[in-house]
Amino acid sequence: MYDIISDVRQASSGSRHTSLSYVFGTLVEIVIFGATASRVRETIAAIFGEFDRLHWKLHAWKSGDLVNLNRTIAAGEQRIRVDPEMAMLIREAADLSKRSRGLFNPAIGGLVGLWNFHDDECRAVAPDPEKIIRVVRTNPQMSDLILHDNELLCGNPAVQLDFGGHAKGYALDRAKQLLRDCGVGNALINIGGHILALGHCGERPWSVGIRHPRRSQPFARLELHDGEIISTSGDYERYFVVNGKRYAHIIDPRTGYPVENVQAATVLTPPGQSTGALSDAASGAVFTAGPQEWRDVAARMGVTHAMLVDGNSTVHLTCELHERLEFYADGEVICVH
């Protein structure tokens, strides 16, 4: 079960309630404004219960549905029954992977495991290069999976699904529906840098700070409109250092190695169906694309509001996102847009 870090509490404003928990391997914050205490408790219990269910269902290395599915694929079984939700997630991930031209690729769980990012604690050990080469040569792709209703056909036993670049966004899509089912119209949910905003915080829009990946303070702020989701992928949470070199958890499927020369990528998606999944996948794909290709990848995925911080700490922005940001005067950030 998830660990409750703090119970629902009521802020001095009298109508702002905040709850924290640890799930999906990260801190999750739910803020609800303008609802009764009983409705807040009911809503937060429903959301954290759903997050807990998804955490175990989609966990890539602890016993659950996804681990069982990966074992079946690795055993060479070509026809596999999956439940409707898993089938939907695979279809959604395959579509997002296609739109990113494979830079978002949940089929490379084998590579993620080789780099020790399937451990709860990252071990500072780089894998054998020959093992990386062997996995890359097998070329696991989402297109290796074909679904007929709820029957999965797989012609490549090297496919090992890892929804780490997708699950948090999907969880936000589920949370958005639960909030509406519970009659809550004003809320903010933050799953480790993947943030959904609904309604307002009183008379003001929800506002979030944009943190530079190498600094503790935000360099800009952004007001979120109703239903928008902002997601960030960075090299500063799950990583290890060997001989002075940082290896972060985002793997380039083309090389089998962690992405270099990028510190963070952020995308903002508008209200709509499955925009949480899109935001999560797109931030990872933009990160993987790097300084030369990130704009093209964002455009292919239908994302107009995007940002990339390169290895030199230069902030690259689309004009659309630049217009939405309010920069702090003392930020000392070099921006290109």
Image: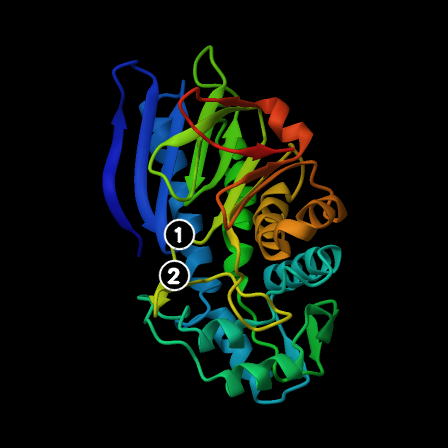
Q: Is residue 270 visible?
A: yes
In the rendered structure, are the residues bearing label 2 and label 1 in contact, judged by CB atoms less than 8 Å apart? yes
Residue 36 x, y percent position in the rendering: 36, 21
Residue furthest top as drawn:
203
Depth check: give the residue in front, 331 or 16.
Answer: 331
**Number of residues whose C-alpha sits closer than 10 Å to that of mark 2, classed few (under 14), some (14–19) or many (20 or more):** many
In the image: residue 176, left or right of residue 77: left
Q: Amino acid at mark 2?
A: Tyr
Residues under labels 2 and 1: Cα distance?
Answer: 7 Å
- The residue beneath circle 2 is 239
The residue positioned 35% from the left and 32% from the top of the image is 217
Nearest the eye: 56 or 164: 164
Is 141 left or right of 39, judged from the image as shown?
A: right
Q: Secondary structure at mark 1?
A: loop
Mark 1, residue position: 236
Residue at position x 38%, y 61% in the image: 239
- Could you say where residue 173 lies in the image, as x and y percent from the top left? 56, 43
Q: Amino acid under label 1?
A: Tyr
Q: Residue at x 59, y 23 (%)?
A: 324
Quadrant into which the N terminus falls: bottom left
Residue 7: mark in rendering:
none
Image location (x, y in percent) of residue 193: 44, 42
Label 2 SS:
strand
Residue 73, quarter of picture: bottom right
